[in-house]
Each structure stands twice: as C-alpha cells, then as structure tokens.
Image (cartoon, coloured by chain):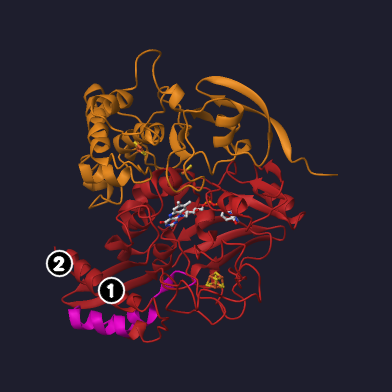
Chain colours: A red, B orange
Amino acid sequence: MREFGYQRVFDVPGAVARLGADPDARYLGGGTNLVDLMKAGVERPALLIDVRELPLDGIETTDDGGLRIGATVTNSDLAAHPEVRRRYPALAQAVLAGASGQLRNMATVGGNLLQRTRCGYFADLAKPCNKRVPGSGCPAIEGEHHNHAILGASEHCVAIHPSDMGVALAAFDAVISYETADGPGELPLAEFYLPVGDTPHLETALPSGALITGVTLPPTPVAAVSRYRKVRERASYAFAIGSIAAALDVQDGVVREVRLALGAVASRPWRAQEAERVLTGGPASADAFAAAADAELAAAKTLPHNGYKVTLMRNLVVAMLTELTEEAAR
Amino acid sequence: MALSTSSAITLNINGEKHTLPVDHRTTLLDALREHLDLTGTKKGCDQGQCGACTVLIDGRRAVSCLQLAIASEGRVITTIEGVADGERLHPVQQAFLDLDGYQCGYCTPGQICSAIAMIEEHAAGWPSAATADVRPEAGAPPLTADEIRERMSGNLCRCGAYVSIVQAVAQAAEAEAAQTPTTARQFSGPSGPGDLAHPAGTTDAEMTA
Ligand SMILES: Cc1cc2nc3c(=O)[nH]c(=O)nc-3n(C[C@H](O)[C@H](O)[C@H](O)COP(=O)(O)OP(=O)(O)OC[C@H]3O[C@@H](n4cnc5c(N)ncnc54)[C@H](O)[C@@H]3O)c2cc1C
Ligand code: SF4
Ligand code: FES
Ligand code: FES
C-alpha cells in the first residue's frame, strides 16, 4: 500500500477545500470499499480526508413530505429509521440485504453510492482492465463473466454496479446533492452514473473533487407498498446476481402507478422504464407482468455465461408484481 | 511541505488509553494484534469477508480489518478482552461455553463480539433481511433461529459450528431479555447506556421525523 496522509474534517467547506487542493486525495467514509481497494493496490491515494465527523449524519422529513438522508448516515441507521421503513420499505430491505451487520455499521450512504464494481479483474493488478487502466482491454468478455451485465454494457466493459441500496434509490427517483469548491449542486440518480461507452473508467457525473452531502427522496406515496428482493449464490452476506426493487399501486385490477428497478444487471442501478410504461394503465395480471418484463429485457445482450440473468430477471419481475398485487388487495 | 504519513495516536480500548505511533496504513486490527498485544481479535481474510476481526466501536460491531487505526481515535473500542465483567464472563461468553458454540475457536472472539452487539440491535427494534415486515408498526420480530442466522451471517465459521452458535446466541439473548424490562430497553454499549453514538433513528421511541 502506498503511504498516505490523513485528515479529519468537521465542516463541508473545509472538506471540499482540502480535497480540491490535492488531486491525489480521496474522501474516506466507512472505508469498507476504499481501504479494501487500497490493500489491493487498486486505489493509491496520497491523502485521506475522513468525512465521518461532518454534520451530515441526519435523516429528516422535507417540507414537501419527502426524506433527506445525510451522506454520512450509516447503512445501519438508514435501514433502522422508522420513516424509511414506513414510507420506503423497499429501501430499508435493500440496505439490509447488503453486506453484513458489521459492514452496515461502518458503511455510509455516500460511500455505498460510490463503491466500485466487484469484477474480479478490476481488483487484480496482474490483469488488464479498461475500468482500472483505460485501453488495456476487458478480459471478462472472454473470461469469467457469470455475474456481469446484460443491459447497458459495451464491448469496453461489462461490469455491474454492486449496490443494493442504489436499486431502491433508483426506483424512488432519488436526487444526489453534492458540494464543490464552486458551491452546491444536484444530480438525479438517473443521471448520476454515466453510460459505459468507451469510457468505463469514468463512472459518475460528479464534478471532480465533489463531496456527496446527501440524498433526497421525493414524496412517493406508491413506495409505501414496495419490496426489495435479492437473489444470490448463498442465503446471506453475498452480492446479488439479480435483484429488484418494486412498488405498485393497483386499483380495481388496473395498474395506476408502478416503480421497477433492477440490480446486478448493469453498470448502474437499472430503472426499468420500458416495463413501467407497458404496465401503467393496464391490467395487473400475470400475463401483463410477463409482457412488461419481456419489453424491458428485449434490449438485453448476453455473454456465454450470463444468459441465465434474463430468465432470472423476468421471473423476479413477475413474482414481485404478483406479490405486491396480492398485498394491495389485502 | 511533505505530508506526514504517520502519527502518534491515542486509542481508547477496553476502558484504557493507549498512545502509540502508527503508520497511517495500519488497520485497527493490526494495531491491536501487532502493537498492543491484544491478540484475542483474530485475522481471517483481512478483507471484510469473514468477521473474525469483529470488535465493538462506540458499542457497535465493526470489522477491524477495514477500519484504519488512525480513524479510530476518539472512539470507544471494546475487544473480546474487554467484554467480561472482571472474573464474571459476559452472558454471551457463558452461553458459548455452556452450549459448545465453537470447535477450533478461531472465529469465536468475533462471533461473541458480533452477538453482543447484535442482541442490542435486535432489542432496539432493528429489522433484518429475515424480517417479513420491516415497517415499524409491525414491531420487532421475535429472535428466531432464522433471524439469528441472518443477523450473524457476517461471521463465518470454517468448522461449521453454526448449529450450536445459533443456540448459544438464542440462550444469551433470552437471558438478557429476562433481565431487562422490555419497555425501558435502551440500545447501549457494553459499558452501559450512553456509550453509543445516537445518530438518526436508532430506536422507534426516539423518532422525531
Ligand atoms: C465483504 C463485503 C460484502 C459486501 N456486500 C455488499 C452487498 O451485498 N451489497 C452491497 O450493496 N454492498 C456490499 N458491500 C459493499 C459496501 O456496501 C460498501 O463497501 C460500502 O457501502 C461503502 O461505503 P463506505 O462508507 O465504507 O465507503 P468508503 O470505502 O469509505 O468509500 C468508497 C468510495 O466513496 C468515496 N466516498 C465516500 N464518501 C464520500 C462522500 N461523502 N462524497 C464523495 N465521495 C465519497 C470514497 O472516496 C471511495 O472512493 C460489501 C462490502 C464488503 C467488504
Ligand atoms: S468488465 Fe469492466 S471492470 Fe471487469 S475486466 Fe472488463 S473492463 Fe475491467
Ligand atoms: S479479518 Fe476482518 S473480516 Fe475477515
Ligand atoms: S470454531 Fe473453528 S472457525 Fe469457528
């Protein structure tokens, strides 16, 4: 590991000023991803700016009835918060489905959004990887890719984003707030992660040096009937091979509003807009759910070892919407 | 000016202050084991994947292999060496002994630290991925074997002593619940209430939103 300096910051302007002054500096949240990658030599910061003492650890109701979540709120506190559990249950479930009790106590909301892919080649300095070393190639396409992307990838990178939390945030139209030396800014989650294209090393639209300060959830009544389901290779403490966040409002058998986001299928949490469009205003039936899933997955591009994800995601969409329809009927 | 890459830090561990020089690259785990001779905390994977290195930081369980020592200054750290009350074992330690919650014992310090904090998380009303209805109105789920397995999934046991680990955790949780009136139960660190940082929403009763 490269040697590095360490500094704690206590106010937001101080944090962005300190980081802006040093292109080799990184913010340190819980460290559960950054420290791991520093041990592997993938990340080599010269300075860590510890953000855990910033006054960004609160969760508050906004004036319009949404929720504002500070960037340093731990994953545990987010999932335990009564208003999150009551108004956005799929978000609490998504966070609880990730990592372990220990890691959720350490991990922050900001760090969770910016965690890097778990593609094995990315973390292995002995291998080429376009995301780590632009232009070096993507060995996953010919190699190990059973948990790689089926949507939105390119021939330059087929890695997935591993966050569970992000999938629920995508379903609920979260907005990310940040601060730079030039002042504050905002990015809807839908625009937060950049398309892969031929620049897989550029992952987010955050300006350089930006500190994430929080995440705002708009008031979303449909989210009260929402769920997250995660499929993985063991029962717990493993990354998803496919996941879904869904919310549904059905009245008299007709879909009034639906939210669907898919995880572990793309370089970002994947909002299933095409499926939502097909469903809205139509019948809440198993056939309609399957047709919506097919419409979304029509764009899927599979590799030799990840084709199962198309079937998996189709089944997840149908099962989840069927369950939510039953729940709404109760 | 060259940036300093090492510092003298003071760590509060098991109620004692230790001042030590550290290279910033030192994890809390290595500081405990290599610098302070507190070798009860074990190193398994060194990557956050096994839980052997679990300690309590401000009363909450955390993996010390991904926690930098320098980032632990000013926080209250409890390791397996600090959970007993003098000669009296912690109820979770006693339950692991009574029910053989281990075979080789390598994962045991991490399992015990994890279980101590997990029982408090549950008592504070935190749901888990095994909880059918996470809405606060549904109330805290009973601490069933499924709940224990899910909540303890961050601690792997290569010997596969899981069956008796789950029994030991259940027994310890019951013993603690019997001691504490359910209405007044507060989420507290090992050295009593107030030990824990109280960020947003640790208990339903504290709800302000
Ligand atoms: C064994 C293991 C299993 C896991 N399983 C899962 C899982 O199943 N599901 C899942 O979703 N995740 C999982 N994770 C990942 C975990 O959720 C992330 O590591 C964690 O959320 C990162 O948060 P952090 O605060 O520790 O980030 P850090 O490691 O501190 O930082 C990560 C990145 O974010 C940057 N950063 C941090 N805070 C800010 C900020 N406020 N502004 C700007 N930049 C910032 C850092 O500079 C760094 O680049 C797992 C991790 C491990 C180690
Ligand atoms: S999929 Fe992306 S991260 Fe993985 S090897 Fe290819 S370029 Fe690197
Ligand atoms: S040694 Fe820390 S989790 Fe394995
Ligand atoms: S008792 Fe041997 S690893 Fe758990």
Residue A274 belongs to the span the image colors magenta = yes
Q: Secondary structure at mark 1?
A: helix
**Whether the residue under disc 2 has CB within 8 Å of ligand 1:** no
Ligand 4 quarter of the rendering: top left
Q: Nearer the viewer, residue A38 or A183?
A: A38
Whole-percent x and y of residue A297?
A: 36, 82
- Can residue A105 be seen here? yes
What's the residue type where badge 1 is placed?
Val
Q: Is residue A16 above or below residue A173?
A: above
> Measured from the top left, where is residue A202 in percent x and y?
62, 71
Q: Is residue B195 left or right of residue B95?
A: right
Magenta residues (range): A267-294
Q: Chain of mark 2?
A: A
Residue at 50% of width from left, 22% of height from top? B14
State the residue position of label 1.
A317
User: Would residue A101 appear left or right of A25 to someone viewing this image?
Assistant: left
Q: Which residue is mark 2?
A: A329
The answer to whether A192 is drawn above or below residue A53 in the figure is below
Circle 2: residue type: Ala
> Would residue A5 appear left or right of B125 to someone viewing this image?
right
Residue B209 appearing in the image = no
Q: CA distance from mark 1 to mark 2?
A: 18 Å
Label 1 chain ID:
A
Q: Position of residue B176 (x, y in %)?
A: 26, 26
Residue A54 screen position, x and y as percent:
60, 44
